[in-house]
Image (tube, rainbow, N blue to C red):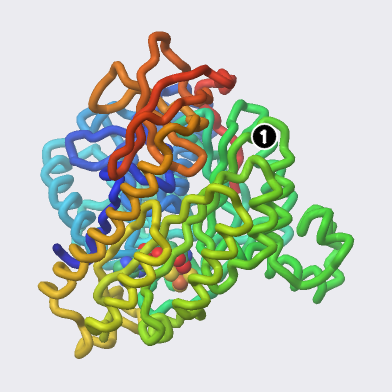
Amino acid sequence: MAFGVGVDQHGQRCPRCPHRVLWSQNDLGGRFVTTESGAAGSSRTMSAVSKRYLIRTHGCQMNEHDSERIAGLFEADGMVPAESLDDADVVVLNTCCIRENADNKLYGTLGHLKSVKAARPELEIVVGGCLAQKDRDLIQQKAGHVDVVFGTHNVHRAVDLLEQSRQSGPVTEILDAAVLDDRELFPSALPARRDVGYLAWVTIQIGCDNSCAFCIVPSVRGDEISKPFGSILNEVRGLAAEGVTEVTLLGQNVNSYGRDLTLRLRSESSGLDPAEVAGSSWATDGRARSLFADLLRDVGAIEGIRRIRYTSPHPKDFRDDTVAAMAETAAVCEHLHLPLQSGSDSILSAMHRGYTAERYLEKVAAARAGIDDLAVTTDIIIGFPGETEADFESTLAVAAEVGYDSAYTFVYSPRPGTEAAELTDRFVEHSVTVERMNRLRAVIERSSVRRNEARIGRVEEVMVEGASKKNPDVLTGRTRQNKLCHFASAEPIRRGSYAAVEVTGAGLSHLTGELREVTHVAQHKRRIPVAAG
Ligand code: SAM
Ligand code: SF4
């Protein structure tokens, strides 16, 4: 296995982000936005009116959500989605750099686009995202046919930069920090072009203040900044009014959400409204603290929101107040994605993760004790520099003890500028990581099958996402525990509806079942261009 291959045991579908209905494979072999049109009308140049755009995204939910914002900006400028590369005037590659394979893919795709552009010189090529932030001028040095390069902090400039390149040639613009709104709190809201109308990602925090030795995120996404509490609630209320019933709250360390806001409120007589910035519970207690548990409760109280998911919590900051809020808030799904990274204390320490294996296990036990029927998933890195057989066996032991529902397993990928990338003399042999990965997968798969089989006979609530890719007669959706569930229905059921399904079978990465009844028919409109900060 090559460095940086992430193995998702659910195959191509991500168990953490079920927003896939309108993404499809196309001639560049990646996922492109292929949503139906309905442009919001042009407020800018007439030249943009008829342009068709295609956005290719590689990466995590942050990148996917950035793509929704780029699409929202383009459509507000009068552009419309293209069906494929063949009819696209503008192609955007929005690429993550967390693992090395993204770099290779980007430069491979740019090589292909060079020949497309040679045949169609009017094609405009844009590169954005964390990889652009990391590589900066290198992209245009390596690929002179790229028209625009922008980073993670200036997504809002996508349309202006395209215009600038039309006037005066290729442009690279990378900012070193986020541009904050008038209140200096959070980047201004941008329109987002969400693919589906019934579920949505909601960013609650950008950046990261941790310094995990393997991770490039802090250097490409910047300092951790929390979105004001009231702005999140307003965004979710707006989504609920449009018929969204499931939201996934996004941040790199959601359990520290709001700490910066409360520190700011305590240190300044800023004239900010405490309840708007930090929520009404905080306004009465006033301690410097995380607001994540408050947020779960308040989002859960919004009418119309039936399901709340979130990613990612950090084990060092995951505390009892979050468990309590999850247990007490009916809308919060019974699923915890708690990244382990390693089960070896010495590797965890070298990674600067801030917890031990024992502490991690205690947190999982507390979550399971507090929340009925909790599914637990994780991220694990194999082959961090210096990982010995004994370290790896500790990881196997923790994985076996937790008994995960599923896991993302990654081969360590050295990222430029990170502490671990300097440890070249401690890199683990490729053949060793392959062998360890196979052994880890076996342990994870055993518990996945066991935990899926344990659901047989239960009636699960499934949010319907559409027809199964393999069999159009079968519908598919996600349970509250984020398990894929396939079932047959004599009648069509609208995407986004909820159904009670009796589980009759279980595999490694899915359940099968029989429809009992439709419990809620989706009410969403077809698409939602709303402001999302
Ligand atoms: N903030 C999250 C946390 O602290 O757990 C992680 C977010 S990161 C976008 C997602 C996952 O990518 C990490 O949990 C880690 O397992 C994996 N990852 C990050 N850097 C990596 C690297 N250099 N090599 C391999 N996997 C990596
Ligand atoms: Fe990366 Fe660690 Fe921050 Fe997660 S918490 S984004 S792994 S630095």
- The image shows residue 305 at horizontal and vertical percentages of 65, 35
Quadrant, the N terminus? bottom left
Q: Is residue 327 left or right of residue 517?
A: right
Q: Secondary structure at mark 1?
A: helix
Residue found 50% across the figure and 59% down from its top: 312
Q: Which residue reaches farthest bottom? A: 425
Q: Is residue 252 left or right of residue 26?
A: right
Q: Is residue 53 visible?
A: no
Front residue (pair 3, 386): 386
Q: Is residue 430 left or right of residue 506?
A: left
Answer with the quarter of the image where residue 216 lies.
Answer: bottom left
- The image shows residue 118 at horizontal and vertical percentages of 12, 42
Residue found 69% across the figure and 57% down from its top: 324
Quick check: is the Cβ at mark 1 less than 8 Å away from ligand 1? no
Residue type, label 1:
Gly
Residue 147 versus residue 522 in the image, above or below? below
Total numbered badges shown on the rendered structure? 1
Residue 493 versus residue 204 in the image, above or below? above
Front residue (pair 127, 140): 127
Q: Is residue 303 visible?
A: yes
Answer with the quarter of the image where residue 137 lies.
Answer: bottom left
Q: Is residue 406 left or right of residue 202?
A: left
Per the image, the residue denoted by label 1 is 238
Q: Which residue reaches farthest top? A: 491
- The image shows residue 251 at horizontal and vertical percentages of 54, 58
- The image shows residue 301 at horizontal and vertical percentages of 74, 40
Residue found 69% across the figure and 46% down from its top: 329
Answer with the quarter of the image where residue 482 lies.
Answer: top left
Residue found 44% across the figure and 35% down from its top: 478
Q: Residues within 10 Å of mark 1 (few under 14, many from 20)?
A: some
